[in-house]
Image (tube, rainbow, N blue to C red):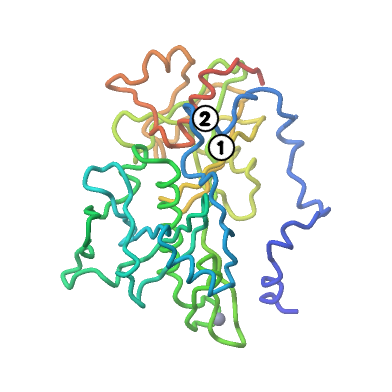
């Protein structure tokens, strides 16, 4: 068996296997007791609604993805919603209140169409209509009663219906991946869309490799002092003006999520985290990421801020954040983000010591 064959054996079935090898066991000894006992209110609820972009209610396999006839019938269903994507932008109504559909009759053979799922019997699709852009490279013309403009959903996400914008962000993520994976990284042959957009497959018979959409896992963590009374809020150099948020960082190859939290906190503010607790996760399609949120506790309080990564970072009590929030110099992250969810949950929680 060569290494490529081993690689091909890594399938969802493999990942579900109960692997007793030591490498599969998290390094709990370094992080102490991980038994959940506080922040029981850290559910997926945020300000009365579920965390945005989590597509609650979308049945991804609502139609058999291998049944071309059923998929074609669903696309022709008058209730079908086809969300157009052009250059990573979605079609927004002129009043900025909703995402618009693309008329079925305006799809061409050159448009990549992916099936996203069904909800309440309504099939949802996303279509890359880039082939229909004008000769000047401008956005495709939007005909019919639906007047709107192509915009980056990142700009307006918080203002829209969470389910619909979530589906739009999901479609955008998938279609961007399809555009950039037209060729097999293993043998160089062309690839083709498979399973109605959930994967691609190499067209070369001897290779027939599978390609799956790339997802970048990232941890995001609210770090507390040993008393649980204060947390670290920071400003990244890339943040919009006055936004203060919690720390975050991408998972390196070979790391557990807990190890990423420990490493990132040490790198960014010089604190030693000794307890980590999972809170929630959120797909963040704007950077093809899966954000995995944690509450963390540091055993020390002396900050050593890495100014290459951060503009500043400091400790804040619940009272300080509540007094400062919304002021000219201190805004919290956007309300559709898991960062905001972690902060709001912590603000209303009872302090828990290390
Ligand atoms: Zn190939």
How far apart in space, not on screen, are marks 2 and 1 (Cα)? 7 Å
Q: Secondary structure at mark 2?
A: helix
Instruction: Pick whichever, 195 or 346, lies toward us.
Output: 195
Spot the residue most to the right.
20
- In the depicted structure, whether residue 72 falls above or below residue 300: below
From the viewer's perspective, is residue 21 above or below residue 181? above
The quadrant holding residue 194 is bottom right
Could you tell me which quadrant the C terminus lies in?
top right
Q: Quadrant of residue 155?
A: top left
Is residue 159 or residue 222 the one in the foreground? 159
- Label count reads 2
Image-based side of 45 in relation to 243, left or right? right
Q: Neighbour class for label 1 at 10 Å: few (<14), some, many (≥20)? A: many
Q: Is residue 2 above or below residue 158?
A: below
Q: Residue at the spot x=23%, y=68% of the render?
A: 133
Q: Position of residue 286 (x, y in %)?
A: 40, 50
Q: Are marks 2 and 1 in contact (CB under 8 Å)?
A: yes
First-in-chain label (2 vs 1) = 1
Q: Position of residue 200 (x, y in %)?
A: 53, 72
Residue density around tag 2, few if under 14, some if 14–19, many if 20 or more, within 10 Å: many
**Residue 230 as seen in the image, left or right of residue 20:** left
Ligand 1 quadrant in view = bottom right
Residue at left offset 50%, top offset 43%: 249
Query: Which residue is situated farthest in the left direction here?
Result: 136
Q: Which residue is mark 1?
A: 293
The image shows residue 296 at horizontal and vertical percentages of 60, 30
Q: Which residue in the protein does label 2 denote? A: 342
Question: Along the line of sight, which residue is nearer the eye, 260 or 207?
Answer: 207
For this view, does 113 lie left or right of residue 135?
right
The residue positioned 52% from the left and 50% from the top of the image is 120
Quarter of the rendering occupied by the N terminus? bottom right
Q: Secondary structure at mark 1?
A: strand
């Amino acid at each position: 068996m060569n290494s490529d064959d081993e690689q091909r054996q890594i399938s969802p079935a493999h990942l579900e296997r109960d692997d007793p090898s030591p490498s599969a066991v998290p390094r709990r000894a370094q992080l102490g007791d991980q038994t959940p006992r506080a922040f029981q209110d850290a559910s997926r609820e945020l300000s009365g609604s579920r965390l945005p972009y989590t597509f609650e209610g979308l049945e991804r396999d609502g139609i058999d993805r291998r049944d071309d006839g059923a998929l074609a019938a669903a696309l022709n269903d008058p209730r079908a919603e086809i969300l157009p994507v052009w250059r990573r932008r979605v079609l927004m109504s002129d009043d900025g209140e909703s995402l618009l559909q693309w008329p079925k009759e305006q799809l061409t053979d050159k448009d990549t169409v992916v099936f996203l799922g069904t909800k309440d019997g309504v099939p949802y699709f996303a279509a890359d209509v880039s082939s229909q852009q004008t000769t000047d490279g401008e956005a495709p013309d939007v005909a019919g009663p639906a007047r709107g403009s192509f915009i980056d959903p990142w700009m307006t996400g918080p203002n829209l219906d969470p389910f619909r914008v979530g589906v739009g962000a999901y479609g955008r993520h998938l279609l961007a991946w399809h555009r950039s994976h037209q060729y097999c990284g293993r043998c160089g042959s062309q690839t083709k869309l498979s399973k109605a957009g959930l994967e691609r497959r190499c067209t070369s018979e001897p290779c027939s490799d599978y390609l799956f959409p790339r997802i970048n896992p990232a941890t995001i963590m609210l770090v507390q002092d040993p008393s649980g009374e204060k947390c670290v809020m920071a400003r990244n150099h890339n943040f919009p003006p006055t936004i203060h948020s919690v720390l975050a960082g991408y998972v390196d190859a070979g790391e557990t999520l807990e190890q990423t939290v420990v490493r990132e906190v040490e790198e960014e503010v010089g604190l030693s985290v000794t307890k980590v607790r999972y809170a929630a996760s959120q797909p963040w399609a704007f950077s093809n990421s899966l954000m995995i949120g944690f509450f963390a506790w540091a055993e020390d309080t002396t900050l050593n801020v890495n100014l290459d990564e951060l503009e500043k970072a400091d400790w804040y009590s619940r009272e300080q954040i509540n007094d400062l929030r919304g002021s000219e110099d201190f805004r919290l992250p956007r309300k559709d983000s898991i960062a905001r969810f972690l902060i709001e949950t912590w603000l209303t929680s009872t302090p828990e010591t290390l």
